Image: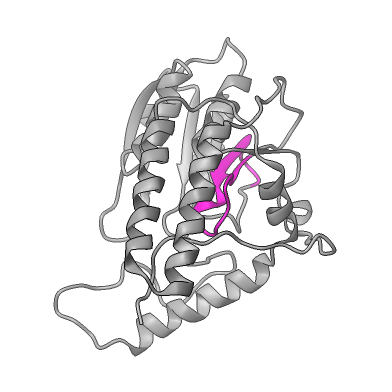
Amino acid sequence: MKIGGMFTLESYDDRKCNNFFRDNYIGDLKFLLSGRCAIYYCLLDIPSHINKTAYIPAYNCETVVDSYLKAGWNCRFYDIDKTNLQPIYKEEDLEDVGLINICGYYGFYHKNQEFLQTCKSKGIIILQDSTFTPYFINPLCDYVAGSFRKWMGIPSGGIALKQNGRFRIDLKTPDKTHLAGRFSAMEYRQKAIFENREEYNTIAQNKFWETELSFRNTFDKFGSDELSINILNSFDFKNMKNKRIENYKLIVHELNKSSFFDPVFNFNLEENDCPS
């Protein structure tokens, strides 16, 4: 049995509604086409008098950096410890910084509240990239931006949260060409599973990357499609978290030890950890 691969489209029950966002994403919440759209949208909301230098992790996706460059920001990078993926902040690096971008990796978040309090005292805006840590929203953050497309089969997965106040600008309607490519890729992935035909997996991958690479040149403050919002508002996130924790524990405890690698993260998960 083949393990892994692309997601298929999630189904939803319009009679169900979870409280995940209501309970965890307190503030002005917007649904967007993607995570990079969400970051870009948050950056556009920041007042013009703020210094346009962002302090962001060096271990990152280029699409995150693209969001800052597209919004007219300069990037200054902080290192990430290679043994435990914790950030290595330096207070001397905060000179002329207007925003710090914080994130966790693969479902594990490091709070570092003392350093963030220092940033607050200097008037630095804090933006949390929640793509890999959707189960923990740091209360010190001004903005939260991320993508649920890393966790589930969904055409649009971007979320943007402003914890205090409301966003000042409107969203654009979603990019129909991008959505069509995402739907098509997930449709062929589903055919590959049900018909057990590997050529459909190849088509799905090709359609996905054709759509993805095109989108990297055209992303904007695009909002989400209605189906994706319905899926997010009815999805059982508690069940997903429990399943992923069970899978993680099975892997780290049951696989034979190897001299070639060691697990990066602790076996003992904290309350808001959810391995991706």
Which quadrant would residue 264 be assigned to in this image? bottom left
Residue 102 in sight in this render:
yes
- Identify the residue shown where x is 69% and y is 48%: 227
Residue 148 falls inside the magenta stretch: yes
Residue 276 in sight in this render:
no
Question: Can you give x and y, in whole percent of width and height, for residue 162 in the image?
Answer: 69, 34
- Identify the residue shown where x is 40% and y is 26%: 217
- Identify the residue shown where x is 52% and y is 66%: 274
Question: Can you give x and y, in whole percent of width and height, for residue 10 in the image?
Answer: 61, 61
Question: Can you give x and y, in whole percent of width and height, for residue 70 in the image?
Answer: 44, 20
Q: Furthest-top residue in view?
A: 49
Quadrant containing the N terminus in the rendered view: bottom left
Residue 88 falls inside the magenta stretch: no
Identify whether 225 is placed above or below 73: below
Q: What is the tally of numbered marks visible in this picture?
A: 0
* Side of 122 relative to 28 (left or right): left
- Between 36 and 145, the one lying in front of the other is 36
Identify whether 197 is placed above or below 146: below
Which quadrant would residue 77 be assigned to in this image? top left
Coloration mode: one colour
Q: Furthest-left residue in view?
A: 259
Magenta residues, start to end:
139-159
* Side of 152 relative to 266 (left or right): right
Which quadrant would residue 34 be assigned to in this image? top right
Question: Can you give x and y, in whole percent of width and height, for residue 115 in the image?
Answer: 48, 41
* Side of 41 relative to 14 (left or right): left
- Identify the residue shown where x is 48% and y is 32%: 100
Identify whether 196 is placed above or below 156: below
